[in-house]
Amino acid sequence: MKLEKFTYDNQLTKLFMFATVFWGTIGMLVGLTAAFELIFPALNAGIPWLTFSHIRPLHTNAVIFAFVGNGIFTAVYYSTPRLVKNPMYSQLLGKIHFWGWQLIIVSAALTLPFGLTQSKEYAELIWPIDIAVVIVWVVFGINFLMTLIKRRMKHLYVAIWFYIATWVTIAVLYIVNNLQLPTSFLHSYSVYAGVQDALVQWWYGHNAVAFFLTTPYLGIMYYFVPKAANRPIYSYRLSIIHFWSLIFIYIWAGPHHLLYSALPDWVQALGVVFSIMLIAPSWGGMLNGLLTLRGAWDRVREDPVLKMFVVGITAYGMATFEGPMLALKSVNAMSHFTDWTIGHVHVGTLGWNGMLTFGMIYWLAPKLFKTKLYSRALANTHFWIATLGILFFAVPLYFAGFTQSLMWKQFTEAGYLAYPNFLETVTEIMPMYYLRAFGGSLYFAGMILFVINIWKTAVAGTFVRYEEDQAPALEKLRPENVEKLKWGWHRKIEGNAVKFTIFALVAILIGGIVEMVPMFMVKSNVPTIAAVKPYTPLELQGRDIYVSEGCYLCHSQMIRPFRSEVARYGEYTKAGETVYDYPTQYGSKRTGPDLAREGVTSLPNYKPDSWHYNHLIDPQKMNAESIMPPFPWLAVNDLDIASTPAKIRAMMTLGVPYPKGYDTLAVRDLKKQAHEIGDNLRQSGIKVDDNKQIIALIAYLQRLGTDIYKNKK
Amino acid sequence: MSVLIVLVIIGIIVAGSFLAAFIWAVKSGQYDDTYSPAVRILFDDSHPLEIESEKVSDKDIKRKYHLRINQ
């Protein structure tokens, strides 16, 4: 058995590691800004792209895909070659992967804050960037899978399995969720509408948490925790059971994001059952990670790396217990749409993803730079303020969630809502928002210490670019056998055929989904409520403004079938009402009230056009305590009327029953309706032109929820 | 709710491919030994490459040391 010598190249690990640190700082800074804007709505200084609803998607996308994403790649590029005894397949593909991913992040930062968004949560990126993501993901996949195929270690360590599941599942999820019909280079409509779109969105959203924030980080846990503790994983057998059961169950749990919505009941039940089952594999993994440290707890007391791992894994355990509990319908009835969800998510991200990333890099940086960590004391300080930061972030939000939900549901003895004014329930929880911003500041301060520590470590040491290793080749790949099998299938499989097969499979998968699904969807989107009609061209344009301004981030459009919600907002939302909503605007959070019946004149909350105008321009003028940011530019910016025919045509392609040739008449109708609203506003003494964005947005708001009320009275 | 059918089919394909991968892993002997893989990762056999001069390019390294950097 001849030993083969080979060399690991640490260049890309280093680049990905620096990118993780850099984008982590940016992403958290954006999040912190958003947290402060909820306290001080005027903090955006009247700048559109600094407004809460514009930077919130930037925050989520940056921390998920830039911070955690680069963290995943750091781990994969470092651990995979060492686990399979084979350098990464191609340095060139690796470079394309690295720079492509950073370019995607930059283009996200240049689009999302400027209102270029699809409004699908954690998938807001516009279609040209979506395509770039798929290409880079495929490049990464080829580089990673080819490394495995040419490996020297027959056994694939459990961490590798987690990486494989990540790659495969994210590819499928991303493509299915992002199927869309472009109307221009920067705009598109989702091919799914209403409740169907909601299901796809949360099928993706939930599994993005599962396969982007969880499985690759479990891979990190299974590699870096044993390495840092210098002891094997507690039970390798458990890790295998953990892996397979986790990935089987996770993919079905998405519907728990839509409990009590217009989604069919049996689908909700399915989501709940699988969510409860998830406790078992999740806790199996959590315990496996923690028990690895048995007998090493004395070192946990001193080593910041192990400390961070312990808090990270504990946070994983808490979040994966809380998640199934939140998926119970009775708990969800209370927690959904409140800040409880935000608290829950941040235990997972700040705790599990953040702490594991910090621990990994504190361990990795000294290795890559062949030196000691610059300051252990600084890292310990980071550990403590980050841990406190998580507590100050999450605990107040739990209280905010309970409080607000109880207030929403409270009736007086006479049978009326105890707090009919939504704003009262917001004002009540403001102290919790202050505390959350304090917690976020602590966590961010820790991040700064982290940057300093890693930077100083890198400067103090010398970068070890190449590391030499040796191992025998896999039996079938040894030279003597390869020679023997020159014309055999082994030989072929190791040659171009594999590359070709992978390319072909990917192409077929993408092509098949892109072709088949939209056709399938278009035919089936038949309205089920006769009174529900397509949006007028002006309303459609207004809806696009609603999407682009990010209104869905604070306002839901889904009234659940509870007495408290029907009393507050009107008739609960039916599936048939949203069949023309491409994509759906159900939303997931009520920082402000639900808007599903905003336009219904017979409801107590109805507001005239002039109120909406004044409120959008300056919410604090209407309600001094409101935390909604002002949107004065809506009355300044002109509506892009020229895009109307293309949008109508796209809607017709998707199956919306506008009369034939309506795209040519749409602009005329749009101008007519805009003039009516403009006149109405001018009668109230408001100086406004018909062609402003605000007119379209008001038209849309006044249409919301009205269809099924038309026949009443 | 035709999207349900689409998602169920995709879900079954994904879960099915996981199942196939699981069967392959068991049959190919991946899990015959559930002890040594956990221990093996703790041994670091690799060592930094000694390079005589500081100014060497990737090409030099490949040529001089006959190393398979990119395979």
Image (cartoon, coloured by chain):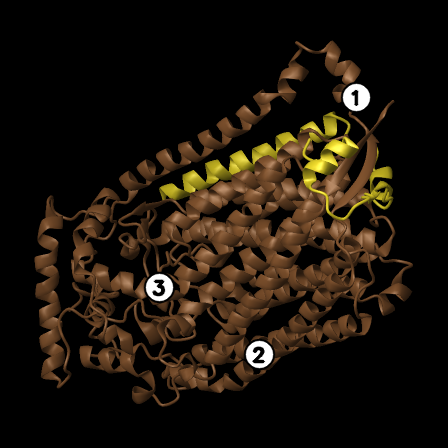
Q: Which residue is identified by label 1?
A: A475
Q: Which chain is brown?
A: A
Q: Nearer the viewer, residue A265 or A116?
A: A116
Q: Label 1 to label 3, Cα distance in Å?
A: 56 Å
Side (left or right) of A303 relative to A186: right
Q: Which residue is mark 3?
A: A115
Subunit of mark 3?
A
Residue A315's mark? none
Image location of residue A544, percent across then percent down: 28, 61
**Mark 1 residue element:** helix
Position above or below: A356 against A421: above
Q: Is residue A396 visible in the rendered structure shown here?
A: yes
From the image, tell me which residue sits under label 2.
Answer: A436
Label 2 and label 1: CA atoms lie apart by 57 Å
Q: Which sits earlier in the primary sequence, circle 1 or circle 3? A: 3
Nearest to viewer (mark 2 / mark 1): 1
In the image: residue A54, left or right of residue A152: left
Q: CA distance from mark 3 to mark 2?
A: 26 Å
Same-subunit check for callouts 3 and 2: yes
